Amino acid sequence: MTTGGFLNPRRVFRQDNAGIRGIPPPNRRHGYVFFAFGARLSYQCGMPKPSDPPSLGDLRKEIDRIDESMHGLLMERADIIDRLIAVKRSQETGSAFRPAREAEMMRRLVKRHKGILPLDTAESIWRVIISTFTYVQSPFSVHADLSAGDALMRDSARFHFGFTVPFVPHMGASGVVAAVSASKGDLGLVPAVAVAGAGAWWSALEFDAAPKIIARLPFVERADHPAALPVFVISRVAADAMATEAGVWSVRVAGWGAKAAQALSTLVDFVAVPDRAFDGAALLVTLPQEIGLEKVSEALVKAGATVRSTALVGSHATRYTVAAEK
């Protein structure tokens, strides 16, 4: 009747009025439960079959569709710029370069960027789009000082401004400043580092009517940047278009030496050239908002130097630093 204490599933039972043979009839308090262990049932799950991967032809059609969409959006952007020109009929002094707006656009670009497309490529595409449409609004040339290296400066100019904007080379920062000063809205690119024999070219920016430093490039800064040469951009720009997160000052000091240079290097970025007339130096000092000119003056005085004069010669956006692998 049972197998290992359990009902034999292969045994056929016959039930009559007395119950099942060999098993007492049920009473009011008990009943029977039978399990058909002998039956072998098979189940098939209705899992969907994986869809076939797209063909190369299908993927290329998708790429063509995206390319056409991008081109269409560029032409749509051009139409808006054309309408903007008609409405604006710019009466501003200086170029149509908008440093504060461009800095914010590049910040948004970096924050949303992801995927296998290198950030360098996306950054350069956007920079060229911005610069080309700025040129369409109000034509300008880029004057560049090649004294820090022809290839380095050309890489920076082409990366940030493309090939549509005319490129005018100069050998020396003073020539760039003079060319920009004589123009209505041209830009100048000058190395933001000390270059032998360059002199204090920024002293020509101290006058009210003079062009100013309006940007520092590259804005998106990382160790492996393809256009890594630090560059100041010089132009005339409307006051409300300026980025003012970092002020750039012309500072002349007497008693300049290694101690003063060390004291200043712990606070700010600066370029220093000799000023033999007062046994001192002419400095180009970049001050972030959290560091005032008074703090710089105090550090120089403690180091034995004397501040002779100061003049604001421009401002720019705070550099946006990202990891090299982004």
Image (cartoon, rainbow, N blue to C red):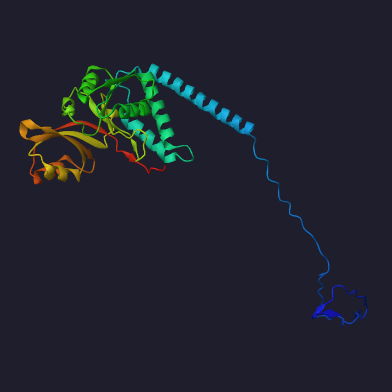
Q: Check the image and report above or below for 43 versus 191.
A: below
Left or right of residue 245, residue 312 in this image? left
Looking at the rendered image, the quarter that the N terminus falls into is bottom right
* Quarter assignment of residue 146: top left
Residue 161 seen by the camera? yes
Most distant residue in the left direction: 278
Residue 251 seen by the camera? no
At 8% from the left and 41% from the top, the residue drawn is 305
Looking at the rendered image, the quarter that the C terminus falls into is top left
Q: How many marks?
A: 0
At 71% from the left and 46% from the top, the residue drawn is 49
Residue 144, position as x, y percentages in the image: 28, 24
Left or right of residue 285, residue 30 in this image? right
At 73% from the left and 54% from the top, the residue drawn is 45
Left or right of residue 138, residue 285 in this image? left
Of the pair 324 and 251, the residue shown nearer to us: 324
Q: Check the image and report above or below for 303 versus 190.
A: below
At 10% from the left and 41% from the top, the residue drawn is 257
Of the pair 245 and 63, the residue shown nearer to us: 63
* Quarter assignment of residue 233: top left
Residue 151, position as x, y percentages in the image: 32, 28
* Quarter assignment of residue 52: top right
Residue 244, position as x, y percentages in the image: 26, 34
Residue 260, position as x, y percentages in the image: 12, 43
